[in-house]
Image (tube, grey):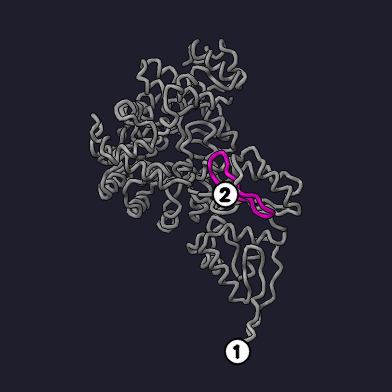
Amino acid sequence: MTKEEIAGVLEQIATLLELKDENPFKIRAYTNAARAIETFGANVADFQDEDAVAKIPGIGKSIALKIKELAETGSLKFFEELSAEFPTGILELFSLPGLGAKKIKALHDKLGVSSIEQLQKACEEGRVAGLAGFGETTQQKICGAIARRASHAGSFQFGQVAAEAEALRSDLAAHEAALQVEIAGSYRRRKEIVHDLDLLVATNEPGAITKLFVSHPLVESVIAQGPTKSSVRLRSGVQCDLRVVTTAEYPFALAYFTGNKEHNIDMRSRALKRGWTLNEYRLAVVPVDPKAKTKKSAGKIPNVRDEADLYRAVDLDFIPPELRENCGEFKAAVEHSLPKLIEKENLRGTFHCHTVASDGHNTLEEMAEAARELGLEYLGIADHSRSSVQGHGIPAEKLLEQVAAIRKLNKTFEGFRVFAGVECDILRDGSLDFPNDVLSQLDYVVASVHSVFNLPEPEMTRRVIRALENPFVTMLAHPTGRLLLKRDPYQIDIPAVLDAAAHTGTWIELNAAPKRLDLDWRWWPLAKQKGVKCVINPDAHRTARLQDLWFGIGIARKGWLTRDDVVNCLPLAKIEKALQRKRTRS
């Protein structure tokens, strides 16, 4: 088992013990052990030595023995026996917002609820509202959460399926019979939510490719298998379709299965105006109607070797996949005004990262080293401020101690710098969680909303704008507070916020965490028009999550952004001046 899987088992044990109303200290022991395992830097093999594991801070002898059993056998008798005490569906209830162990225990003990289906029925019958500590409002919120969950069935966050998609692409591309391989569809357009995956392979041996696809270890079940198209269900639950084509058909298929419906209609319309038909396999001359009074001759069909040739054939500049949403890309392609979109290599650094000082899983030094390994020139540390109870926010004195530690660490680097910041809560009235005399000692400040999401739009908008007007606020984090497929954005007037950002010189974050991808790509053209700078941040709580910058680049491209629009494309020498700009203009 990986250390992440071991930590996951320990977390589930803590959850089940909480449902049993066990001793809080025992529950906390498993929670702390899970976090200790996640931050442990050794190999999995080390977990088979209970003496070595017991020396890890936060892990006692008893839990070390259980970790050894997990590492050696892949299972744990204690966990299996504990799980057997509860219905299999009860852990699914934790996926509903607002339901913690105490409420789930009450639902189970008083109403016999052990699944989402049973909970929905209890809500519909009004039995949940009658429980102590619930009431009509809580019952309505639970009903809403269940309805949202149902409406999202078959929907997946882009980040949920990316690892499987890329693994399949890589393995298919490695096959000797594969000539060209790509993931098409909404995945290639970098949509934040996908419903399925479309794999396209050019080959002269379709049978060999199909066999590899349907028998791949990531495939849970085969839905259909044919000579040119097969469909499977992956372990994540997402459906994946494979289409095998010839190399001649490949550019047409890739374009067809990438663009959205409206984009493809426009492409076919442009082909028809030239006397051609366009489908997923070829360009062809429109058959001449013998009864037609006037015969319109078609132009000669050009040689199409790739997508660029296809767009050129209908007098368009090549349109990047991310822009194929019929949102102005054709006009720009005709006028030769498509932007040169940002590339991942353009990013020189990033901000909004967490450490063990708040709710992160790695130390300051580990985060810095991971950033350097990625080739970044700078990294910003922004642990949660004191009011963030859920984020283990740190008080002012601890924050300033961290600032001193960062200054000391920077003396060991050459050509790399850690910037000292904070993710400072925007309080209900728009004031900040720390006073200016604390914020002024930092290199930058990330302001964000973490509480009271239910304000009316005018009040929430005023709240955020007041924070942007603070001279020490450098950037606004995850501006709508959404959690994809889990929590809707709070009500806020984004154009008004963008106006305020333009006026105050505040950067707006594109939060690259796959569960957020906030600000939404649909707003970035307006932000760009207003002169608002984007900052792509991973909101990383562990070293591995620095890789989420890749998701942010995809959304930035989808939002028509270039390297000039994204402030952390600036090199180290220039970003230092950019961080000071708002403070000096105020």
Between residues 305 and 447, which one lies in front from this camera angle? Answer: 305
Q: Could you tell whether 488 is left or right of 166 in the image?
A: left
What residue lies at 26% left-to-right and 47% top-to-bottom? 456
Badge 2 marks a residue whose secondary structure is strand
State whether residue 479 is above or below residue 526. Answer: above
* Residue type, numbered disc 1: Lys
Q: Quadrant of the N terminus?
A: top right
* In magenta segment, residue 235: yes
Picture quadrant where residue 121 is located:
top left
User: Residue 352 sits in which quadrant?
Assistant: top left
Is 392 magenta? The answer is no
Q: Which residue does the numbered mark 1 point to in the structure image?
A: 293
Residue 507 visible? The answer is no
What kind of residue is marked 2? Leu
User: Quick one: 377 or 552, which is closer to the camera?
Assistant: 552
| Circle 2 residues within 10 Å: few <14, some 14–19, many ≥20 | many
Considering only order in the chain, which callout, 1 or 2, is on the residue closer to the N terminus? 2
Q: Position of residue 398 (x, y in %)?
A: 38, 24
Of residues 296 and 327, the one nearer the viewer is 296
Of residues 86 and 537, the one drawn nearer to the viewer in this rendering: 86
- Give the answer, above or below, for where 469 lies relative to 305: above
Indicate whether 240 appears above or below 95: below
| Residue tagged 2 | 197
Percent position (x, y) of residue 533?
44, 50
| Chain part drawn in magenta | 224-241
Looking at the image, residue 220 sits to the left or right of residue 80; the answer is right
Q: Say whether residue 574 is visible.
A: yes
Instruction: Say what secondary structure mark 1 lies in.
Output: loop
Label 2 and label 1: CA atoms lie apart by 46 Å
Residue at image x 50%, y 26%? 8
The quadrant the C terminus occupies is top left
Give the image location of residue 382, x and y in percent. 43, 33
